[in-house]
Image (spheres, rainbow, N blue to C red):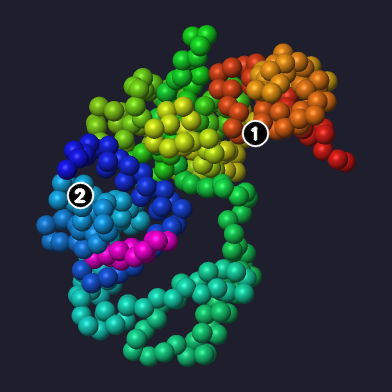
Amino acid sequence: MQRFDIPFEHQKRQQSAEEAVAQGLWEFLPAAGGWQVRTPRDTYVIRLFEDGSKTCTCLDHRRYGAFGLDCKHICGLPLWNPQEATAPASTQPTEKGVNRMTTENLVRECGWVKLFHPSSAQVTIPLSLEKPILVAEAQALMASVTSLLQAGFSVEMPCLEDGEHEEEIGFVVRRAKVNSDESETPVVDLYPVNANFRRVAKYLNEETDVREFEAACSLSLQTMPLYEGDNTIERGKNPKLDKYVVALKRPVKIVWKFNPRYEGENDKKNPKRMFVRWVNGAPAPDGNVVLSPSMWLSLEDAMAVPCPMGSKSHPEYKGMTLDQVAKTEDGRKVLEYLAGDTYRPNGDKNGQKAKAAATILLASLQPA
C-alpha cells in the first residue's frame, strides 16, 4: 500500500470539510447512534462510540480509517455543530433530560423532504411516518414561509455576484511578502470562525488597504505579531505558532471567490481563492470614508499611465499609455484584465496605479 503523509492528507480533508460546511453543501441529520450526512453526491452515516471514536460509511474512511485518518465528513461534523459532535443524536440532551434512542424517536425523525416555495425558496420539511401531513398543516407551512419573505427575509444572499462567497472571519495572522526590489508588502491570512486553516490571504498593497483592514477588524497592523514562517499556520495545532494567530473581538464578514487560474494542489503560483472585499466596510479610525486608489486619479491622469505589460500577440503594449492601448482593437480587453481580480500587482506600485487607472478608463468608456 502507498504510504500516506497523514498530517498532509488530514489537512486536505479538513479543508474540503470547511469549504463544504461554509457553503452549506452538506446537511447533518439525526441517525441511530450518530449522524447522517447528506451531500450533493450521496448520503453517509457517521457512527459515534462511547470511547470517542467515529466511523463513516464513505469509501475514504473504509479505506484509510484504520490508519488514523478521518474522512472529510467526520472532519465536518464538529464544524457544523461542535456541541453535537461528541455524542450520537440518540443521546443528545433535551429540556426534559437525555433523549434516549427509542422506536418512537426513530419514527419521529426518519423522514425529510425538500420542496420549493413559489418564491423559489427551498424548504426542508420533516415527515412523520406515524401520520401524514394534513392539507391545513401544509398550508400553514406555506403561509409561514410567505410571512418570512414579507418580513424582509430574502431567498438569495444579498450583494453577492455569481461565484462570490460570504464568510465570517474570526482570526488573522500577519505576514509579509518580500518583493523583487526587496521592499515588503504586508499580508494578512484570514481564518473563518469555525475553521483551523486559512481561507484566503489579503495583500495590503496600499495604505488604504491597511486602513480598511484595521477598520474592519478593529486591529492595529503594526501591533500584531509578525509570522515569518514559510507555511501557513494550522490554528490550534502548535502552541508555538498559535501566538501569531490573533482572535478578533467580533467576527467580520468578507467576500471571496475561487481563482479561475488555480490549477490544483500542485499549483504553487496561483492561490486557490481570492479576496474580493470586506462586507459593510467600516469607516477608517479617523472617521473618514476609505477611498480606493482609483479615486485619487483624474481621467486625464489615468490616460497618461503607462501600460505595465504586453500580450503575446501585442508585446508593444507595454510602455504605451493606457489611453493609446484603449484605442487599439483589443484595448478594452487589456483594460478589463488590468482592472479585474486576476491581475494582482501586489507590491508593484506602478502596477497598482495602472490597475486604478484602468478602472477609471473603463468607466469612461461606458455608454451614458
Q: CA distance from mark 1 to mark 2?
A: 42 Å
- Amino acid, disc 1: Gly
Give the class, few, some or many, for how many residues have Cα within 10 Å of label 2's Cα (few <14, many ≥20): some
Find the magenta span and give its range: 34-46
Secondary element at tag 2: helix
Q: Residue at x 53, y 31 (%)?
A: 213
Q: Say whether residue 365 is left or right of residue 200.
A: right
Q: Residue at x 65, y 22 (%)?
A: 312
In this figure, which residue is indicated by the disc labeled 2? 64
Magenta span includes 35: yes
Q: Position of residue 94 (x, y in %)?
A: 27, 71
- Amino acid, disc 2: Tyr
Q: Which mark is residue 340?
A: 1
The part of the image, by quadrant, that contains residue 264 is top left
Secondary element at tag 1: loop
Quarter holding the C terminus is top right
Quarter holding the N terminus is top left
Q: Position of residue 219 (x, y in %)?
A: 47, 30
